[in-house]
Amino acid sequence: MRHHLNPSTLGLAFLSASIPLVSYSQVYLTEDQAVKVFFPHQVLARKTLELTTDQVNRIEKESNGTVRSTSLVVWQGPNKETMFVDNVLGKHENILYAVAFTADRKVKGVEILEYRETYGGDVKKDEWRNQFVGKDVTAPLRLNQDIVNISGATLSSAHVATGVKRLLHTLEVVHEHL
Amino acid sequence: MNIYKRCRPLLGTFVEISLTSWPESPFSTWVDEAFHRIEVASSALSFHDPHSELTRLNRSAIGHWVSISKSLRDVLELALELQNRTGGQFNVATAQPLMYWGLLPGRVDSAGWGYLSEPGYEVSGLKARRVHPVQIDLGGIGKGYAVDCAVELLKQKGADVAGCVNAGGDLRVFGPKAHAIWVRSGRPHQPEVRMAPLKDEAMATSSVHPSHDSSPYVDIRRRRPLLDSQTVVARANECVIADAFTKIALLLPFPAAQQLANEYDAQLSFVS
């Protein structure tokens, strides 16, 4: 039987390094709260952007990633402050996260909004990785270059890294239309 | 209980910072600062970041002194001390075998075993130099060090500030409240094991997975990855010590590992 850990009743459950995980979920921030974390003094408006086939093709070609949804949640402020909300599916987890960009389209930060394991799995994450902060579209964010998959098992934070890379290229493609 | 929790992808894992007690204050800004402190530590200690201080040292000419920060100095010195205390079994300069096996990025022609029987680098003040052509990877203790940095920053915000910094299972609890901790064993489909509550204490977990034919732990004597399937949990006052002793417990016979751990006020246990 799988155990569902509810941290509010069980205390602090944690995602342990290098060992199998059982069902675990956690909500950290809402979209609104994430906007306030990244841009405490600005007012950003939320909208949903529909990517065209041409845009999807360009993003996939330039990021070497797959665009799973053509609908994109974007928060934007008066000075082109931007936050994307995106979802990545690991082998065993579903991660909702937000990436904020500065006006000159560099990564300002990444916050996990929700982390949900889809079933027990084997997540290996005992390695270091580069920082996202300051990455721009020219910076490669590739598995085995920026992030090392030592065991061959899923690296959940690697999925976020590839997601951030895809969103960097997404912003390059769509920023003139925002 | 009121909990404020944030999570960012850092250190190759997800770093969760939670506050369970705080005064009237801009606590969300403190969490920002704590995450930033982890980023700063990472930028010094990361093997993978081409611009980190560690990378600069790894790429420096043999014998050439390189200026380093206090963070890198602290971790390199602790690693040397533990290398000495474990008869050379704990060694952070083992990135080259891992690269040779394809477990770390970078191409090398050999595992370089001949340079691993003694310290591969020296530290003097805020300088370090490689004395052998070794590659240093601080993944075994750097995460714990980064957790400590964040906790120290948050502790300075007030005695009534409580919470936990958890970097993928390497965690440290601080403040007046005790936290219950569950550990997941290295074996699939096993229920979590509840550990004695932590209060102002750190815990780290490492395991060698039974289904894997490799591991990031280098058995220098046998010149192969450590493959004995086990999960070890270490508790200590500092997360860097707990982190280091999970590796030492995997590398040394248990009585020797626990004996050394006692000197660092650390406790080891294996989870089946």
Image: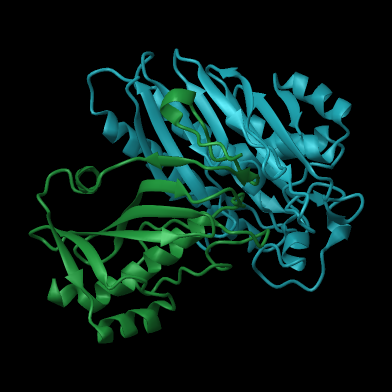
Chain colours: A green, B cyan
**Residue B54: x %, y % from top left:** 59, 54
Give me the residue at 88% from left, 33% from top.
B253
In this image, B38 relative to B33: left or right?
right
Residue closest to the eye, B8 or A140: B8
Q: Quadrant of residue A172?
A: bottom left
In this image, B84 relative to B187: left or right?
right
Give me the residue at 85% from left, 30% from top.
B254
Query: Visible in this render: residue B124?
Result: no
Give me the residue at 52% from left, 44% from top.
B69
In this image, A156 relative to A164: left or right?
right
Q: Quadrant of the C terminus of chain A?
A: bottom left
**Residue A56: x %, y % from top left:** 30, 80
**Residue B134: x %, y % from top left:** 75, 58
**Residue B40: x %, y % from top left:** 44, 45
Is B78 rendered above or below residue A131?
Answer: above
How many numbered badges does the structure rendering display? 0
Query: Visible in this render: residue B246?
Result: yes
Residue closest to the eye, A144 or B130: A144
Q: Quadrant of the N terminus of chain A?
A: top right
Residue closest to the eye, A124 or B94: A124
Q: Quadrant of residue B135?
A: bottom right
Is B13 rendered above or below residue A58?
Answer: above
Instruction: Give the farthest residue toward the front.
Output: A1
Give me the residue at 62% from left, 49% from top.
A126
